[in-house]
Image (cartoon, helix red, strand yellow):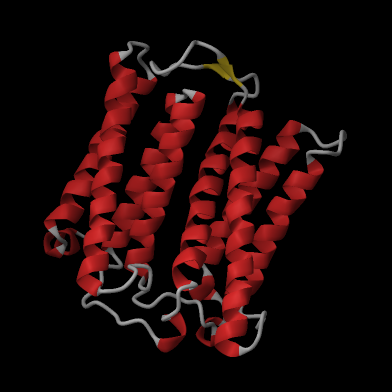
Amino acid sequence: MLESLYYTSTLFKVTLLLYALALVGYIIGVFRKEKFWGNIPYALFTIAFLACTALIAGRWIEAGRPPFKSFYESLVFAAWTTSLISLVVEYRFKVRLVGFMSSIGVAMIFLFALTKRDVEIIALPPALQTWMFIPHVISYFLAYGALFVAGLTAILYLVLPGGIASHHSLGQQSRIDFSSTTYQITRFGFLFLTAGLLLGAWWGQNAWSNYWGWDPKENWALITWLIFAAYLHFRNIPSWSEKRLAWVVIIGVAAIVFTYLGMDYLPTAEDSLHVYSGG
């Protein structure tokens, strides 16, 4: 991993360092109530997000195409969307714990990306050279980022079912209900998950004259969609407790992780059109 880090770009190293500093700031800030420690880690996380934005933009210019093709590129973009959603959620709900947990996840994504570093830039195959490639990928990764953060707030609900007082300097000391927060984030993520699924079907029809090919990744994307659709449905059933609903979200996030990272382990992986190159 150290060798891979050595050969990465300076911007990658700076971005990773900024995320690490943000994590350290959150570790300190979670246990302190001073306003200073509410601003510093959030600011560092924001700067790291901007550095990640520059990293993606630079890769786009260098490759001459959207930087979503290889596994390495997708991991960097996953870190970007997770950071974006986390920053918005922390600003909206004023809970430092969200940024703390997200910074751990993003740092792990960046470290994992080191092991998948591209040796050379890969050209897009003809099937991906379409305008639908960009909105399809962006929709899915915005959904993944949002639902990952929703999974974090679902975990926080299980640990702190009574909620917690906001300890972020940007807001009032109001009490945060993590179950309600999870629901709001999940609704947003489900919207983009649906958009990604529909755009993928439309793309399939245009590229291969088939809306649905029962590809392994397509099937798991549908399973993931059904889990979160079930969560939104179960919320309207009085007999479903908040605890059970939180577990549905966590199971949905596990399905997302498998959909994204687990395809290589399926016996039908080599038949899939959706396995990332460089993985």
Q: What residue occupies the far front of the structure in this picture?
A: 131
On the image, which quarter does residue 67 sit in?
A: bottom left
Q: How many marks?
A: 0
Is residue 197 among the parts visible in the rendering? yes
Please give left or right for residue 163 compared with residue 83 in the image. Answer: right
State whether residue 157 is above or below residue 149.
Answer: above
In the depicted view, which residue is nearer to us: 32 or 145? Answer: 145
Is residue 261 among the parts visible in the rendering? no
In the depicted view, which residue is nearer to us: 79 or 27? Answer: 79
State whether residue 250 is above or below residue 156.
Answer: below
Residue at (37, 69) in percent of width and height: 71
On the image, which quarter does residue 183 sit in?
A: top right
Residue 111 in picture, x, y percent from top left: 29, 54
In the depicted view, which residue is nearer to us: 233 or 103? Answer: 233
Looking at the figure, which quarter contains the N terminus? bottom left
In the depicted view, which residue is nearer to us: 56 or 220? Answer: 56
Residue at (47, 23) in percent of width and height: 94
State whether residue 15 is above or below residue 197.
Answer: above
Residue at (36, 51) in percent of width and height: 80
Residue at (80, 43) in percent of width and height: 234
Looking at the figure, which quarter contains the C terminus? bottom left
Residue 40 in picture, x, y percent from top left: 27, 24
Please give left or right for residue 122 compared with residue 228 in the image. Answer: left
Please give left or right for residue 30 compared with residue 92 in the image. Answer: left
Residue 31 in picture, x, y percent from top left: 37, 18
Residue 135 in picture, x, y percent from top left: 49, 64
